[in-house]
Amino acid sequence: PASVDAKIHNALKDYRKEHHPYLRPMRMLHIDPFYEKTFYIAEGLLSLIALLILVLSSVNYVNLQTASATSRLREIGIKKTAGFSKRSLILQFLVESMSVSFLAGLIGVFLAELVLPLFNRVIGVTVGEHIFSNLPIIGIVMLVTLLVGFLSGLYPAWIIASFNPVMALKQKYATEAGNGMNTKKILVVAQFSISLFLLVLSFIFYRQTNYMLTCDMGFDTQHILFTNIITARDGSFDQLRQRLLEHPEIEDACMSDYIPFILPGGDDLNWEGASPEEKVFVRFYNVSPDFFSTYRIKLDQGREFSRDSRDGLNVCLINETAARVFGWKNPLGMHINLYDRKMEVIGVVRDFIAFSVHNPNEPHMYRLLSDTGNLSDKIYSIRYAPGKKKEAEAIANEEFSGFFPDDAFAFSHIQGRIQNEAGMKGWSSFRNITIFFALLSIIISSVGLFGLMVFFLKRKMKEIGIRKVLGFSLSRIYLKLSVQFLGYVGISILFAWPVAYLVYKGLPGAHKYGIQIWEFLLATLIVLVVAIATITYNILKAARTNPAEIFKYE
């Protein structure tokens, strides 16, 4: 394929300098017909989220292991005194870690098998029926599980195996020395950063996919039926239109060669004010005068085609993008060079999403379609009154059957065309998945934060006891301990916010919702609420401990 692509690259150089033909595998057409890679980017982002959740879980494990290390000090001291080497202790803890991870992997596969039908319903796509029948997936999951268990257990194993046997037997927490707490601070910041990043990312994904599904297309997508007819009949569409409008269920009707989300062709054109060799690709729409009113496409300047005066074939309308590309500040009265004719611009149409939210707006030119002549291969659109779809469809079928007695046709709803062509069903699934990730990240963050607080407060128990003996109130102790811990949230903002914003900028699609600061603030508030709730529970529990219990081993 690469060799053929290289040979045909310049096949159209005499016709279009900026357009080059290339081969495309048929197996990729249903996902990525034009190398837009939008779904691949979405897949990559989901993979990134999955990886971050895995890292977050690993950080949680490290925190919980190191936090629970004090309960194993005496075991370590006795084993070291009995002659156990550091290597054997590390091996023991690594085997424990990998065993826990492997068991978690098995439980995860069973849970995935149970949840898969629900997951398929949530995302609207069947990704599989039985996980246990997919041996490659199970094999990959188990290998990743063992690898995660090894990497997650490496640091705790090294730290715990490094305990001084004398200090361990005295129940002294050996990691108070050296850089143990520096590493722990890094893990704390990493914990908050990943949690905050995942929450912001979930908000961004949800709002972007929701915007793609509900954004203003620039035309009214409701109450439109259309059909394409191949016929040998000549005649006047206006006659059929008048018969349709006699029914109150029909509000408007038009004829065109293309409609939104059925992409027209075009050509490289020159325009007034440009040098003779300067050209730009413009898409052509041939429409009847009522095209804009039927689709409720608004005008920015000028006027639509006039049905009464019968505008000639040398006038046209353009969209805002065309006026901008041509560099026209006052487009009305300007001319476009269409082959051997000069087309005068009589109106400027507001931009609308013509094909997909992923595609940028292109220059459009609208030409008047002759009412008389061959009616074949035209798209006929009707706007029906709200709530009158069935009645309007029955009327349209009856009138069109009488007008085109020998031709087959079937009316479709424009909304279904939009969803199919833009891949909205896939993005709707993507939106639902982000909600799941948001909930999952909050749960994992809560568990991890609990482990961090256990570790933090075990080191602070003597300080808490001394402060209580000296008469410190519960509120002062709480404030003293919580401020330092919550300060890590502020540091995590410096990492999470910029990275989340860069992801937003890199999201696929030419049309995006406007990101707002409240999304970052809300995500931060959620992390703070979870942190404060966890911190409050653990600090109050520790602060209520009898000082005598704390100092009884001293």
Image: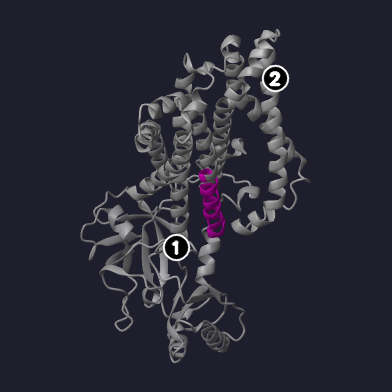
- Counting from the top left corner in percent of width and height, residue 93 is at 67, 22
Q: Which mark is residue 92?
A: 2
Residue for point 39% across, 32% down = 481
Residue 42, above or below 549: below
**In the image, 166: left or right of 99?**
left
- Residue extending farthest bottom: 246
Quarter the N terminus occupies:
top right
**In the image, 378: left or right of 76?**
left
Kindly identify the amino acid type of the residue bearing the numbered disc 2: Gln
Residue 433, above or below 491: below
439 drawn magenta: yes
- Counting from the top left corner in percent of width and height, residue 206 is at 47, 53
Residue interval drawn in magenta: 424-442
Depth check, mark 2 against mark 1: the one in front is: 2
Return the residue at label 1.
214
Measure the alpha-carbon separation of dots 2 and 1.
55 Å
- Counting from the top left corner in percent of width and height, residue 223 is at 47, 77
Residue for point 38% across, 33% down = 477
Q: Where on the picture, by quarter, is residue 171? A: top right
Q: Is residue 326 visible?
A: yes
Element under disc 2: helix
Q: Is residue 41 visible?
A: no
Total labels: the figure holds: 2
